[in-house]
Image: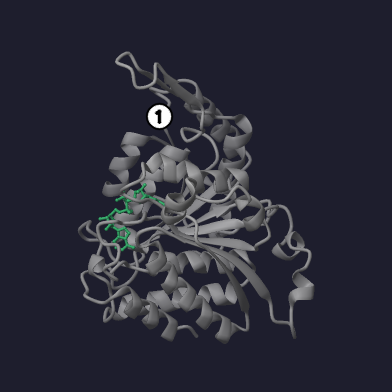
Amino acid sequence: MFLKIVYNLGGSFSQRRKGYAKDAKKGMPRLKIAVIAGDGVGPEVIGGAKRVLERVGERHAIEFGFEDLDWGAEYYFRHGRMMPPSAVEILGACDAILLGAVGHPDIPDHVTLNGLLLPIRRGFDLYANVRPAVLYAGVESPLAGRKAGDIDLVVVRENTEGEYAPVGGFLYHQQPQEVAIQTAVFTRRGIERVVRFAFELAQRRNKKKRVTSITKSNAQAFGMVLWDRVFASVAEQFPDIETETLLVDAAAMNFVRRPESFDVVVASNLFGDILSDLSAMVTGSIGLAPSANLDPTRRHPSMFEPVHGSAPDIAGKGIANPLAAILSAGLMLEHLGQSGAAGAVERAVTAVLAEGQVRTPDLGGDSSTRQVSEAVAGRIG
Ligand SMILES: NC(=O)c1ccc[n+]([C@@H]2O[C@H](COP(=O)([O-])OP(=O)(O)OC[C@H]3O[C@@H](n4cnc5c(N)ncnc54)[C@H](O)[C@@H]3O)[C@@H](O)[C@H]2O)c1
């Protein structure tokens, strides 16, 4: 179902990585994957995703070279930074990045986020954050009366600028008269490319063929007004796609009231972040929501991660749902041109959910992370 999210704008994966053909042994693709398991439940769910990928490798003749990177909170405690200065070069030599989560109760969240995730997203210009939300068979939505397949939408979040641009500062820092300035940055180029991505995704999905744009341009009369104007001008180039524009407050309401009406939703960095937690919850659990941080031009490695964070409340208990991380690995396979393997991952997850025998507590079961991961690995065809 998540197939076709990948954008092929600037050449194929094999064109990006010149050595790819030489790496292939007896026609077997070799994929070098940087793995940042990170903090909290990150290593638990990434362990599950790697287990499934190993199985995929056996079944689909793909050789995975995992480069495990111990970056995150523990690295911060030792080195005073979340990742080494050479991080971007290390990651740049890989075909893709698989990330668990970052965040630790003893480190301010803005330090973990700005020290690892955001620099990678911006450093590689991963401008399209794609977050599918599907109500699977065997999973109950907290919304009454919704059945499998009723909810099938994708939030496309602008991932490099907007409200998360590191522009601002403190004046009179930590004095009684302290002032904080936080500036959102919206550029015509930044909006245009992510909106175009959303329209092309709606065409490739070929489902409801509708793109909904979310802003708050009644109150934010500069950046979001520019967003509305750019959205309207890009929309003119896609006459086959229906459009809708919503203010973010109405969008929050309608994600609950009529989630089945959405197809592709495009939003700014902040609004897309918030709405995709909501879309995850209406499809049963945040533990089911995967995401892809894509560089659609394929100049850089793209990054794949569950939508959820490090979940310190359940970390170490072995009960985190690994399916979001496993589905993220599926998105990664699709991006790397392994559509058959990607489809096998999604079919295995779909089967395990539909059977309903093995599931973690967030979905009402009592299985462990490991048991769910093994169940999915065992269903890889
Ligand atoms: N991409 C990221 O790395 C990312 C994203 C969001 C939050 N964070 C960080 O994670 C930390 C915790 O943040 P939070 O509590 O706001 O969000 P969270 O997503 O970690 O947790 C929210 C709730 O969802 C539950 N949950 C999350 N993942 C789950 C899973 N796989 N299975 C079952 N239940 C799951 C948690 O137990 C918790 O009740 C913070 O430090 C935050 O900065 C990181």
Front in this rendered view, residue 328 or 82: 82
Across and down, in percent, residue 253 comes to: 28, 41
Across and down, in percent, residue 203 comes to: 57, 54
At 32% across and 36% down in the image, what residue appears? 250
Q: Quadrant of ligand 1?
A: bottom left
Q: Say which quarter of the image contains residue 282.
A: bottom left
At 31% across and 44% down in the image, what residue appears? 254
Regarding residue 49, the answer to whether it shows in the image is yes
The mark tally for this picture is: 1
Front in this rendered view, residue 157 or 245: 157
Q: Which residue is mark 1?
A: 216
Instruction: State the SS at label 1.
Output: loop
Q: Say which quarter of the image contains residue 196.
A: top right
Regarding residue 240, the answer to whether it shows in the image is no
Across and down, in percent, residue 102 comes to: 42, 53
Badge 1, how many Cα within 10 Å: few under 14, some, many 20+?
Answer: some
At 58% across and 53% down in the image, what residue appears? 294
Q: Say which quarter of the image contains residue 376.
A: bottom left
Q: Vertical placement of 323 versus 28: above or below?
A: above
Q: Amino acid at mark 1?
A: Lys
Q: Vertical placement of 201 versus 322: above or below?
A: above
Outermost residue toward the front in this view:
78
